Amino acid sequence: MKLAHAKEHIVQISVEAKSIPLLSWLGAQTQYPRIYWHGRDKQEEVAAIGACKDFKQEQEIDDELLSSIYQSQRGKSSNQDIRYYGGVAFDRTVECWPDFGRTRFVLPRIELRRHGNIVKLLVNLNFEDTEQQTECEAAIEAIKQLKPAKPLSPPNKLPLMGRSDLPNYQRWKELVEQVTQPKFNQTTPKVVLSRQTQLEINDVVDPWMVLACWQGRNPNSFQFGFQFSPDRTFISCSPERLYLRRQKELFTEALAGTTVRGLNQEEDEFLAKQLLEDSKNSHENQLVRQEIVDVLTPLSNYVGADESAKIFKLTHIQHLHRSIRAELKAGVNDFQLLQGLHPTPAVGGLPKESALSFIRQREGYNRGWYAGACGYLNKYESEFSVAIRSALIEPGRINLFAGAGIVAGSDPLAEWQELENKLTTILSILVEL
């Protein structure tokens, strides 16, 4: 590999590759980080390993600094295929999970990127921080260490040593009652409360096998995973898009309001109709829609949103959904969008600051990247999913997360059951129910 005069700081080499199962390939690799991304539209799938550029913020972040770092990175290559994969924690003002940071973005060393039936092998080189020959040698070494794809370990139910919920039901009931008090609810009409369910296990879990099974159950979701070290993997099978930006065109959505699926088509349609007509859920979705429109209006020349909600169906649950599209003003960048849209009222609440303050002080655990924003940054196109329906896999423990929007009239027991409904799919993969 010889690049005589690299005029750009970031260079990408691309060759067509054979089509192989990307999760099986990723699971066989020994280099870290290991990153997986699969878009909700099913068109694109990415498996990536290693890092030739790694931005990790462990302390409190200055968004302006983050934005300027990324804007300067954008200028280091004219190649529109260069991508930085990563995520932003739910709450960047509190301590972060080990490995993940309050925000972390990686330009991988090697990517396999499938679009439709075409697979490309991409190798990224960073000549800004490293002498040219040294960087080329590092890339060659990474290529030499590649392993062939091998089948993922077969799915198996784990013997459960113990389960704990944080907050527990008694505390959850207290929190819901606090949020629904008329005096509090007047100034903060919605708080999304969540729960961490810890499963204690003795077995070693292959996170990529779990994600592959989850993917099979919810194919119309985003599927992604980040493993920065052998100890911890964050995986998600999330139905929710934070945004997709193509140059100045932006696509986002209001996803809030939930019910279960029916046992047959007739019952399923009845439950969907009930959800559409339910005033509590409709109000919740309308609040989310209005907040997103209000955030985007100063950043956009045009914002259009669905007036009425539609039904978005997953394996065990169905949601209310409204599509929103905007044409961004010149000069609006991805960090302004992340700063404005994240966290959405569907995972935080309204107004944003008072809801976040309540969660920070009362919820009782650190959400980390759960309900954060995960995806990729690119000069021409960026996409982020809201990391709900997610799991953090650690040695001896699997942490599962679920949340519910609490508004006036919310019932603690019904909302607790909603959390259980949201965990049904992943629990059915991991343990005997």
Image (cartoon, rainbow, N blue to C red):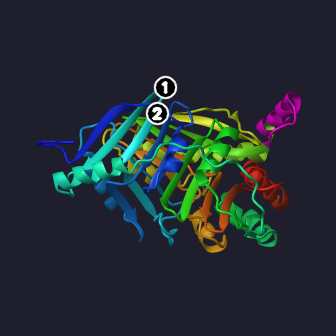
Whether residue 409 is visible to the viewer of this picture, yes or no, is: no
Give the camera-side residue of 43 and 415: 43
CB atoms of marks 2 and 1 within 8 Å: yes
Taking the spot 40% from the left edge, 55% from the top edge, the residue there is 105
Q: What range of the chain is rendered magenta?
A: 260-276
Residue 291 in the image, given as x and y percentages of width and height: 56, 48
Is residue 301 magenta-colored?
no
314 above or below 411? above
Secondary structure beneath dot 1 equals: loop
Taking the spot 64% from the left edge, 47% from the top edge, the residue there is 287
Is residue 275 magenta-colored?
yes
| Residue placed under numbered mark 2 in the picture | 114
Residue 97 lies left or right of residue 347; in this view the side is left
Q: Which mark is residue 117?
A: 1
178 above or below 248? below
Residue 7 lies left or right of residue 384; in this view the side is left
- Magenta span dominant secondary structure: helix
**Label 2, label 1: how far apart the Cα atoms are:** 7 Å
Residue 27 lies left or right of residue 12; in this view the side is right
Residue 351 in the image, given as x and y percentages of width and height: 58, 58
